[in-house]
Amino acid sequence: MPLHLPDPPSGAHDHVKSRLHTLAAHGGLHTKALRGARADQLDLSTPHQVFTLGADDIAAGGGLDRAEPAGWRYLVESAGQVVASAETMPAPDGTQRFANVNEGPFVDATDKAMKVVRKLPKLEAAGFELRLLRVPSLYLTALWLHSPAEDLLVPLQPSPIGKEGKSMSAAEFLSDLAEYARSRPSLPPPPPV
């Protein structure tokens, strides 16, 4: 069974594509790969939901069930090559609104990891849904392959736990991440307001 790309909320894809084309048409894309891009050459692919997980949850032994939905992410292609990502975030009315375009290291890392993930033997045995997991306070981003029976995670480069581009069980991933989270010095609490 191939990797399942979930359907984003109604209208999200068209909204992001429209904003991206508007930015391109009016010179609003300033990143290196997109600066000279023509709107008619830009397309969106590989939709996946973005989740965030707190370092405190991980250090306390929390699992992926504590991950919170944070929006949707698309890979931006120009002439068939992945050059950026575009994201949405939830609006107060429940719809998804354009949040940003990014050309950082996780874009290339996602493209490379997707090539590895699509060749995993486990994909044939069970249907996995593509997700993205972020642990912002630990500077970690990973592809999250979710199925009702199993979760696999692929840390994206750069990863504080290493193992970039390698498929890990949820238990192994969370154990490595918990160890890393516990080993980091704690930040002092913010001053009272």
Image: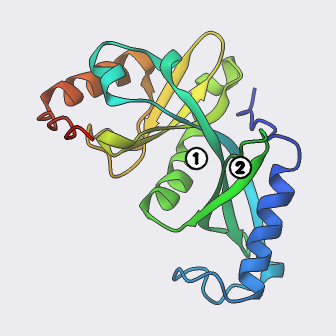
In the foreground, 120 or 151: 151
Q: Nearer the viewer, mark 1 or mark 2?
A: 2
The mark that comes first in sequence, 1 or 2, is 2
* Mark 2 closeness class: few <14, some 14–19, many ≥20 residues within 10 Å: some
Rendered residue at 32%/12% (across/down): 61
Q: Position of residue 104 (x, y in %)?
A: 45, 65
> Disc 1 versus disc 2: distance between alpha carbons?
9 Å
Badge 1 amino acid: Met
Query: Which quarter of the rendering shows the N terminus?
Result: top right
The kind of secondary structure element at disc 1 is: helix
Question: Residue 90, position in %: x, y?
Answer: 69, 43
Q: Are marks 1 and 2 in contact (CB under 8 Å)?
A: yes
Picture layout, residue 144 above or below residue 104: above
| For residue 22, above or below residue 102 | below
At x 21%, y 30%, the residue is 180
Residue ranking furthest to the top: 149
Q: Is residue 133 left or right of residue 188?
A: right
Q: How is the image coloured?
A: rainbow
Question: In percent of the image, x 29 and y 18: which residue is there?
Answer: 175
Whole-percent x and y of residue 80? 72, 69
Q: Quadrant of the C terminus?
A: top left
Nearer-the-camera pick, 74 or 52: 52
User: In screen coordinates, is 31 left or right of 4?
Assistant: left
- Return the mark for residue 26: none
**Residue on which the image places disc 2:** 46
Q: Amino acid at mark 2?
A: Thr
Location of mark 1 (residue): 114
The answer to whether 38 appears left or right of 178 in the picture is right
Q: Is residue 26 above or below residue 116?
A: below
